[in-house]
Amino acid sequence: MLFEKYKQFWETGDIEAFTSIIDPEIEIIMHSTGTVIDPDLWLERITAIILSDAYAENIRCLYENDDIMVVHQITNSANGTRDAVMYVFTKTDGMLTRVETGATPLPPKE
């Protein structure tokens, strides 16, 4: 399944592991606005997060089969903000082809 490569990306910064499971035409939908983000811009943003002081913790796969992967994690931004983030990926032919995200702000870590 694809979750291990997804988790590897967040834990080690292995960008190739992540891009190997992403369809080049992936549709990225922001839950907060309903807008669709360009795949290259999204990958650029995700890569910048990985290369910064930001990190993810408690990365869990809630469900994965041949059609869908649901992931939940806590994302800690370089500016100190924290969010609980849910990713719902649609899969086609072993690739992630669509994602919707939702985030809930969390209090800062003590």
Image (spheres, rainbow, N blue to C red):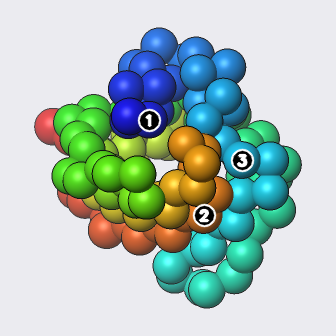
Q: Which residue is mark 2?
A: 98
Crowd rating for badge 1 (residues with CA inside 10 Å; few <14, some 14–19, many 20+): many
Q: Which residue is mark 1?
A: 2
Q: Secondary structure at mark 1?
A: loop
Q: Which residue is mark 3?
A: 23
Image coordinates for residue 77, horizontal then vertical, percent? 46, 41
Residue 44, by quadrant, is: top right
Q: Residue at horizontal 60%, vertical 85%?
A: 33
Crowd rating for badge 2 (residues with CA inside 10 Å; few <14, some 14–19, many 20+): some
Q: Secondary structure at mark 3?
A: strand
Mark 3 or mark 2: name the one nearer the start of the chain: 3
Q: Residue at horizontal 52%, vertical 55%?
A: 91
Image coordinates for residue 104, horizontal then vertical, percent? 31, 68
Q: Residue at horizontal 60%, vertical 48%?
A: 93
Image coordinates for residue 71, horizontal then vertical, percent? 32, 51
Q: Nearer the viewer, residue 90 or 42?
A: 90
